[in-house]
Amino acid sequence: MLNIPLWKRIVIWGLCALGLLTALPNAFYTRAERHNDAVVAAERAGFETAEQATDRALWPSFVPSNLVNLGLDLRGGAHLLAEVQVADVYKARMDGLWPDMRRALADARGEIGGIRRAPSDPSELRIQIEKPEAMAKAVEIARGLSNPIVTLTGVGQNDLDVSAEGDTLIVTLSEAERQATDDRTLRQSLEIIRRRVDEVGTREPTIQRQGENRILIQVPGIGSATELKELIGTTAQLTFHPVIGRGTDGDAIAQPGTVIYPSVDDGDDGVFYTLDEVPVVTGEDLVDARPDFDQNGRPAVAFRFNTSGARKFGDYTGANVGQLFAIVLDEEVISAPRINQHIPGGSGIITGNFSVEASTNLAVLLRAGALPAKMTFLEERTIGPELGQDSIDAGRIAAVIGLVGVVFFMIASYGLFGVFASVALGLNIAMLFGILSTIGATLTLPGIAGIVLTVGMAVDANVLVFERIREEMKTAKGPARAIELGYEKAMSAIIDANITTFITALILFFLGSGPVKGFAVTLVVGLITSVFTAIWVTRLFVVTWFDRKRPKSITV
Amino acid sequence: MAFRLKLVPENTNIDFFRWARFTFGGSLAAVVAAILVTLVLGLNFGIDFKGGTTIRTDSSQPVDVGAYRDAVAPLNLGDVLISEVYDPTFGPDQHVAMLRIQAQEGDEAITPEIIGSIEAALKAVDPSITFPSVESVGPKVSGELIWTAVLSVLAGTLAIVVYIWLRFEWQFAVGAVVALIHDIALTIGIFSLFQLKFDLSIIAALLTILGYSINDTVVVFDRLRENLIKYKQTPLRDLCNLSVNETLSRTVMTSGTTLLALIALLIFGGDVIRGFVFAMTWGVIVGTYSSVYVAKNVVLLLGVKRDWSKQDDGPAGTQFATGK
């Protein structure tokens, strides 16, 4: 037991050295961070500016440069938990289905008579038919419009459920299709949020799906959650509609096939436009949008359509010169210009009541694409950067004081063995930071508390062993045997005690969120490193010392 | 012989059962009291569990709670709690206050307009005011967070009990769980008694206390298990005492170093995590106490089957069995 084979010694020293090396960048946080940022920026741009080169030179590239990520509560930033209103998409699907359904049923007018869309829940399509006795035929036609679902689980199912109730034909999305749609909506929303956040170019945003229909967004460095919400909370559904009428009565009831939207343009207060429900072109056909100015120097957004969008836009403007044309963003008319001539090129500018900031924002939103559904925000947190810095400073002071106290206690109680344990504690903390940096873990405020707690508890395994050695010394078997027995007998207590703590830390990790999770990570990693340093590193110290000195008796 | 700091004399022989009526009985009474206090006073739930918004303000001017209240009152936000925060780590002209606004009817998270209007109202009172943090949690999420929190504490306790049961005997598992309930009840009780803010981080602290307390308990149990094999004839009561005495210097040493680190954090760690650190400090104290005075008493009450060579002819704890 007192003979540790050479390969084990090498492995232990190697792991310690690796721990120190990977922890090193954290001691020079700002330098290493500037180096990392410069490398990433240069990689993205494909070339390197002089400034980036100086930043990069701040940290040697052959040394690891991974840092512990600082959580939002330490760095400052915004946290949002959004719920995607997946049911919005059902309505869009039903509205999209209606023209096809109308056409298909109209073809069979002789048998089923006239049809009419009845008011209904937005997630279903209700159609009244004139001759209820021909309902079977109508159901058959409606079923003909459904498609089989291609998912792994939905084999053999169709996307539409068709049923009849008296003279009413009811079409809804099938359960399997709803699930598939929800999943698609979430993925699209995630992708679009990611694009929008990336456009702003902040460091390491976290954008994650949570559960069935939620998205967690954390953006460090952003001023406030409100700012973030403006960026990602806007649906940014851009559509171009023919204008049918203009009025000032917002409560007027829209004729079937038309919609009434308010105007938000300058000098158009209280004006409502009646528009054709079916847009000529939508934002989906946009390929580019950027902030611009109109001929009067007012902020505007310049846009370009893809080929099919350009053709539709060109055809429409060519056929309707002199007519009004509404540009609608999220059910509000931004502007309704008169078509002065045929616009063939597929590009144009949107003018409206914009500030420079608003036009820049709108361009970002249009470029990233529209969200498929609205979002509501369930949780939002903003933490200022000063508060985070205060917390880091406070945590650092507490850790140093705790460390000094523990080292003092250990040396006073166990003499040389206490020195061994204290050096091992230092290595333990280095390794903890090394592992946290390597796995890219995020350090949060409770995480700092976890580290301080680790400092206090890390010596526990050493204490168990040292106390045991003391006891074994009493039975006078000689120092070598006492050390050996001390490690051997303390082991079961060390293992049992740490596994139980480990279990609670795992539960914290899986059930906790945000900062709590950060705490769990430091606790788990801290447990692993402290058990390692206690049973291997300290033992290696003790054994090496014992081999050299061969003392007749030891005092623990 | 070199000098050694001894927190505990070398060979202690304390009878830990001598005052069992007061220690164990007192613990039981404290647990009952803590549960009653929690039921009567309730907990001061933070926005994590209740929903609502907290805004932290920071200003170079002294905080005037009355003026803040008057500024916010016309906004009709319902229940608004304003409290000044003191902390030794603050600079000389740093004045911090916390505003807590109840969850608004019909809204999940608070709207940017409301936050903007509150900030504008406070800025009118004190132009130097800044808002280092704004947090808002909707009622939907807070309901789920409560559930997750309860679930995680239960799951933690259960997992530990199962582990102890596998590694030791069922009597030890019962002893451990009683000790854990003791620690959790007393921690929740003190939060209720002083109406300290109870939020998600306190749940994290509770789970850590679970881990820490069981750590201490396991060390005693481990020694008891060893002594049970070593001394087959000694009464269980004496063995319990012996095991606690043998591990006492370790218990005091580890609790001492952990408390040292925690107290440093409590004083210098800033007000943001003070509640969390307080829960942990308190938990370490009651956790240490429970592993010395609660867990083993339960094991003694239940008894342990000592001689596995004989037929099992009675309930566990043969030395107490009266025989047929």
Image: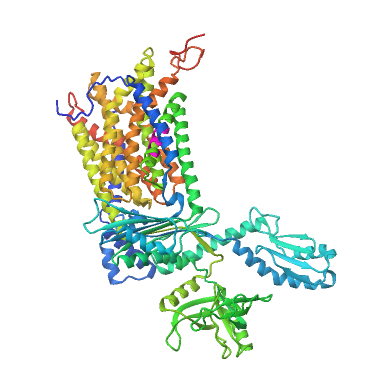
Toward which corner of the image does residue B67 lie, by quadrant? bottom left
* Of B104 and A98, the residue lying toward us: B104
Q: Which residue is located at x 41 percent, y 24 percent? A: B298
Q: Residue at x 33, y 36 (%)?
A: B284
Q: Position of residue B220 (x, y in %)?
A: 35, 26
Q: Is residue A135 left or right of residue A517?
A: right
The number of numbered discs placed on residues in the rendered structure image is 0
Quadrant, the C terminus of chain A: top left
Along the line of sight, the residue nearer the viewer: A517 or B296? B296
Image point 39% across, 44% down: which residue? B202
Asked if residue A95 shows in the view, the reply is yes
The location of residue B303, given as percent across then percent down, is 43, 19
Q: Is residue B273 magenta?
A: no
Magenta span: B180-188
Predominant SS along the magenta part: helix
Magenta region includes residue B183: yes
